Structure formats: C-alpha cells, structure tokens
Image (cartoon, rainbow, N blue to C red):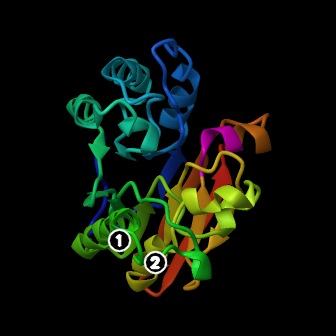
Amino acid sequence: MSDNSKNGQPSSPARIAAVGDLHCKTSSQGAFHDLFARISQDADVMVLCGDLTDHGLAEEAHVLVRELSTASAIPAVAVLGNHDFESGKADEVRKILCDAGVHLLDGDATEVRGIGFAGAKGFAGGFGRGTLSAFGEPIIKRFVQEAVEEAMKLEAALLRLRTPHRLAVLHYAPIAATVEGEPREIFPFLGCSRLEEPLNRYRVNACVHGHAHNGTLEGRTTAGAVVYNVSLPLLRKRFPDRPPFRLISLGVEDEKNMRITEAVGSGG
C-alpha cells in the first residue's frame, strides 16, 4: 500500500482496524477469512493486540499467516500476548509472523501513513493503589521487575516516534476502566498501571489492548487519552451484528486540532 503522507502527516485520516485475542488454532483454517477481508476493505492499517495464537505453536502461527493473506493489501502491526508464550516457542511464532510481513512490536515503533505505532506486550501487576510493589520475597520482586521492564519497553518505543499522532499497542490493559466487567479477583492479572505512565508522558492519541475478554470497551488515562479494549470475544458479545473490530480514524485539521473518531466495524 502506498503511503500518501507528506512531511510525516497523512493527507487524509488513517483508518486503523484493531482487534486482539484471535486465539488462532490449528483448526482455525477459514475462521478469520471474512474478518480479515472486511478489515482490508475498511481500513488502511490493521493492528493485532496479542494472543494471536492459542497455545503459542508454530503450526498455529502458520494457519494465522494463511488467514492474514486475505488482508495482504494493507500493513499489519501486532504485539504478542501471554498465550503466544505458552509453549516456549514465542521466538518461532514471532519469526513466522515477521517473515509474512507483520510489523511485530516488542519495545519497537513503526510509522505507517504518518501515524506512529509503539508497542509492547505489557504485563500484569494491578492498578492504582493496588499495584503490586517490589517488596518481600525475591519471586515477587522478579514479578514486579517484569512489569517495570514491559513499561520501559513501551516508553522506549514511544520515545522513538517523531510523529504528531501516536497509537500505543498493548496486550495487557494499562488502566482498570477497560477491565471492568471481569471478576475483581483477577484484575491484577489483566494489566498494570505502570503501563499507563508512558502513555501520559508521551501524550498518545489512543491506546488499544486485548486480554480482558469480559471487560469494558473503552476508558481514558488520567491524561485523557482514550483506551480501547479490542478483545475479539468482547467485541463479538457487545456487537453481534457488526464486524468484530474497532475502527479508529486518526487525522488532523491542523497541528493544534487533533481529531479522533471511532466506530466498531462499519457494517452494522
């Protein structure tokens, strides 16, 4: 796809289709054909928010790549999720997807149509006053350090961007608002407030994530950036008659007047 941007800015709003938690299995051949074909029709860029495979198997990744061929006309940006690490073959899954042309982000950034995409998997740890602190047993400190390192990856990715429009891509949630609807007992395992800090510091336009299948569609950071939960199971439940992806349009009237519009799919 040609990039019609000039001086780092899109000549028209970029349409970004975001969805997560595909959980592609070896038996999923054909399951995502219609979804990706519709995304290719409606969007300029596709963003996949982790749990791309169900058990992190190379065979599952190969099936997903075949499914993605129906959207080969547009760029794909993605992060991995916890399911993609389940079998200890995350590097193999990553290579299969990258070889197929997916821009897989892990503390990295890329620019498409004048929009900057910064991504990381993220991690668990809880929100607000309930965020787990690095105190006590060494294993707790290692757990917290993993959350800190994922937040640092996101910050490093955002720091690389020089675009006026920035979309953060995560698997785990950066705020509690978009996991509301899940059992309170599992909130700490669905995301971490440490991921919100880079979003506020670098003033992203929006953030997309998955992981919380029964959460809430959207919320905002304390700095006002909109956060979308684009988990496929959630979108299917909330919008059974529409294509299950979030369509976000990023554009500007001028540098001081940013415009963000959004819809779920476009065919409902």
The rendered magenta stretch, by its main secondary structure, is classed as helix
| Residue 86 percent coordinates (x, y) | 40, 34
User: Could you tell me which residue is drawn at 34 percent across and 57 percent down?
Assistant: 113
- What type is the residue that disc 2 sits on? Ser
Q: Which of the image's four quarters has the N terminus? A: top left
Disc 2 secondary structure class: loop
Disc 1 secondary structure class: helix
Disc 2 residue crowd, few under 14, some 14–19, many 20+, Cα 10 Å: some
- What type is the residue that disc 1 sits on? Val
Q: Which mark is residue 123?
A: none
User: Which badge, 1 or 2, comes first in the chain's sequence?
Assistant: 2
| Residue 24 percent coordinates (x, y) | 49, 25
The reply, left or right, for residue 158 in relation to residue 267 is left
Which one is in front, 267 or 174? Answer: 174
User: Could you tell me which residue is drawn at 53 percent across and 43 percent down?
Assistant: 20
Q: Is 265 a magenta residue?
A: no
For label 2, the residue is 133
The magenta span reads 230-234
For residue 41, above or below residue 134: above
For residue 27, above or below residue 173: above
The reply, left or right, for residue 28 in relation to residue 202 is right
The mark lying in front, picked from 1 and 2, is 2
Q: Quadrant of residue 53?
A: top left
**Alpha-carbon distance for marks 1 and 2?**
10 Å
Q: Which mark is residue 148?
A: 1
